[in-house]
Amino acid sequence: MAPLPPSAPLLTLVVPAYNAQDYVTRCLNTLVGHAEVEVVVVDDGSTDSTPALLDDYARREPRLVVVHQQNKGHGGAVNTGLARARGTWVKVVDSDDALDRASLLRLLSHLRRWRQAGQKPDLVVTNFTYVREGSRLRRHSVRYRGILPQGRVGTWSDVGRFRPDQYLMMHSLTYRTQVLRDSGTRLPEHCFYVDTLYSFQPLASVRSLTYLDLDLYLYTVGRQGQSVADEVIIRRLDQHDRVNALMLESMPRAHEVPPELMRYLVHIYTMSCVVITTMALRSGTPENLAIREGLWQRLDAQRPDVSVRVRRSLMGRLMNLPGRAGSRVPVAGYQVARRILALN
């Protein structure tokens, strides 16, 4: 793919949108109005008034581009948006979420200074805040103080250890666009939970990174039927497993990446195993229990080096306890983690 032109916008914000008529305007209102920001909205085959609403918005906002496509799912919409991105950096914003405008201004100030100085970090990490649907009260912000190089551009050797319940999510990531493209990341279509892959696969191509303590991303939770609800996760456990398999497939070898990065990749992969194992045990259905069994068999067969590290971790040991404890402890531990993350 051709390199970005020198006149590229500072930042591209990619907004995948499907049947988003009730909230996409609210989202876009927090993104537009910046001369250095390009907004690419991908209408993913919406069947409500979203297409017309977006076209009308684009007529009033010259820096907003609307792409209409047949439905390909969240991953397919993100792929389309990333392919159209012209900014030096790129960030994905879901259509039912928003950005804090003051924090966005501060982020742009940092990006502008880095680009002018010729110092372009491959990854910029910021905070995200859980916002309860229908309430102005912010429940809790996820921050990375003391873990990542803060306010300066560093490398993976500057990265500390993440807690078991702590990991980078799509909402916290702003990639340098060329690095993201060079990583070859392409999300599967018609599959939920691809955010995890977006937060995983490109990291092997990241060499420089920084953390800005900005509560930038406002992540809406509490909507009925949301994909992070436990009952929805159980119903779509096969899709979680599909993403887990793709994560394992893209996992680098230890000698290919810095040890701090490998440690983190094993950590986030372990958390994927935790979700699948605990939800399978919680549902107790033969289909989901078979998914759980298949996950561990796949891990042992394809990457025994990773399997050893996962099984030796605290969470890995809890996932594989024998007897009745092996059925109860993982579920209880997962529920504690959910409360910590303010998802309930």
Image (cartoon, rainbow, N blue to C red):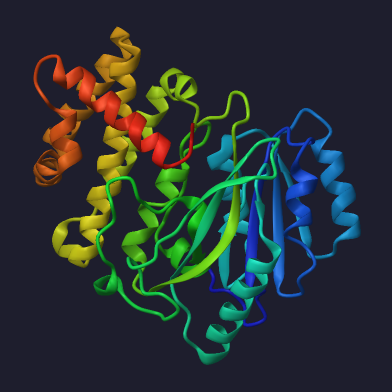
Q: Is residue 230 left or right of residue 289?
A: right
Q: Residue at point 12% right, 38% down?
A: 311
Name the spot of residue 290 as percent of width and height, x first: 25, 15
Task: Please determine whether, in this image, residue 98 is positioned above or below residue 88.
Answer: above
Tell me which corner region of the image, top left, top right, bottom left or bottom right, holds residue 35: bottom right
Q: Residue at point 57% right, 48% down?
A: 78
Q: Is residue 209 or residue 40 the one in the foreground?
A: 209
Name the spot of residue 129 as percent of width and height, x first: 55, 51
Tell me which corner region of the image, top left, top right, bottom left or bottom right, holds residue 18: top right
Residue at the extreme top of the image, as rendered: 286
Task: Please determine whether, in this image, residue 234 is positioned above or below residue 191.
Answer: above
Q: Looking at the image, can residue 248 be seen?
A: no
Residue at the extreme bottom of the image, as rendered: 117
Name the spot of residue 139 as percent of width and height, x first: 56, 45
Q: Is residue 62 left or right of residue 91?
A: right
Name the spot of residue 303 as percent of width and height, x first: 14, 42
Task: Please determine whether, in this image, residue 327 is positioned above or below residue 27.
Answer: above
Q: Is residue 62 or residue 273 the one in the foreground?
A: 273
Q: Is residue 312 or residue 258 the one in the foreground?
A: 312
Q: Is residue 260 or residue 318 the one in the foreground?
A: 318
In this figure, what is the number of numbered marks?
Answer: 0
Q: Is residue 292 left or right of residue 72?
A: left
Q: Is residue 278 left or right of residue 57?
A: left
Q: Looking at the image, can residue 70 be seen?
A: yes
Q: Residue at point 32% right, 31% down?
A: 334
Q: Residue at point 68% right, 68% down?
A: 102
